[in-house]
Amino acid sequence: MPIMARTAEATRVRELQRTLYRAAKADPGRRFHALHDKVHRRDVLECAWELVRRNRGAAGIDQITITDVEHYGVDRLLDELIADLTDGSYRPLAARRVFIPKPGSSERRPLSIPAVRDRVVQAAARIVIEPIFEADFLACSFGFRPKRSAHDALQVLIDEAWRGQRWVVETDIANCFEAIPHDGLMAAIEERIVDRRVLALVRGMLRAGVMEHGAVTRRDTGTPQGGVISPLLANVYLHRLDRQWSTRGTGVLVRYADDLVAMCKTRCQAENALAAITATLASMGLETKPAKTRITHLAEDGEGLDFLGFHHRWVRSRDPRFRHVCFLARWPSRQAMQRARERVRELTARDRLRWPVEQVVQDLNRFLRGWAGYFRYGNSTVQFDQIVKHADRRLALLLAHRYQRAWWYGRKLLNDRPDRYGLISLNGTIVAPRPKPAVADGTLNADGEERR
């Protein structure tokens, strides 16, 4: 499809989303009736295909890949989907169940991979219904939402810590994506959508089941991880927790999908907050994960907490001019550092001895840039130096193995090259986050309050 055509269709789809969002925002009690015709609109399905294509991903149980669809003909596939959705004959296939390693744990996370054609329909449905629910979602929710990121959630921790909210409840929802009850989820969707065909489409996606070891399993709970629409459906259901918190909770809630942090001023408030979270989740058929649930006090020389890959700790400034200033510092957590080292080790493993060094360095640089792009917003200088040195050592070791020499020979080869084979440095990439809004003169007392 020509670039101009893609741009025009994307513009029409964005205008549709803006229209739906404004209508939902203007009338919080409105329930939408005519949506199904928008799901199978040609421009919506073409935008959905682009989203699926960019994300690539593996084949579903039909073994049809993105490349296979491109050979088959994208227009041909979309024409078939339009016809099936229009006459009501569309039926999703069961998703293919695989298990992937869970970072920082010996557990494995279940992942459900729908067929490519089903991912396109899920993306189209998400394009249409997401703006309606976005109009309702509260400010405490950050995960899998447009124009909201993990760094926005992390910024709340810094802001609230400066305001004295330093008793922190940290927890996450046990097996969240697999445990959400279908009846409760559909009831949450029906608060805004009453188009029977759209409801039947979503219900069909939930009931399609997963195939594992050649057998299809269907349950009455779960919106399986791996589906394009699953993050949105999880947010729709967990919005009930956010609403309950706005009326019953104490402190400030930060929710990134199923990861929860509540920041309070006192231990009593933190205990009440944990009780409120536990009770609300229980009423929704969900529960917290005991191993990841605790209350932490952010204090100087005290313990910290891990959230969204960062370790957070209340520290005192090392600058003699600002020794009176304490602040919430953050840097890559121990688990994040271990995962980064493991990835560097994979990229410099012995099975790459025959690869051109420049290709190995290119892959290393791609990873390091992405990793630093996320963790640069913090107090991560020491950790950045450690990862770069680790990459440097691993590259030198790879060179030594290539020439069957001792490790020092690889180090010599690396140091003799002025450009070090193009291996990047992460010096100067750190951005220290500050509380918002910024104080007038930038000077704070030991409690994080503006000096007057």
Image: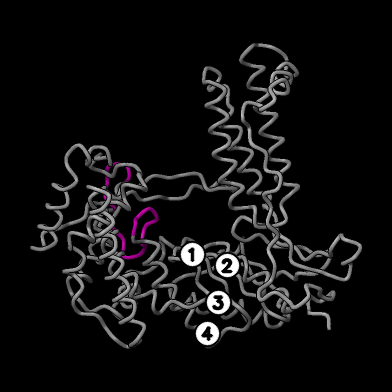
Assess whether residue 225 is covered by the magenta stretch: yes
Which of marks 3 and 2 precedes in the sequence?
A: 2
Could you say which quadrant of the image residue 164 lies in? bottom right
The amino acid type found where label 3 is placed reads Ile
Assess whether residue 74 is covered by the magenta stretch: no
Give the Cα separation between the discs numbered 2 and 3.
18 Å
**Above or below 88: residue 69:** above
Which marked residue is nearer to the observer: mark 3 or mark 4? 4
Which marked residue is nearer to the observer: mark 4 or mark 2? 2
- Left of 316 or right of it: where is 105? left
Give the Cα separation between the discs numbered 1 and 3.
18 Å
Could you say which quadrant of the image residue 437 lies in? bottom right
Q: Are marks 1 and 2 in contact (CB under 8 Å)?
A: yes
Q: Which residue is mark 3?
A: 277
Q: Which residue is mark 2?
A: 153
Res 246 label = 4
* The furthest residue to the top: 404
Span highlighted in magenta in the image: 212-228
Give the Cα separation between the discs numbered 1 and 2.
9 Å
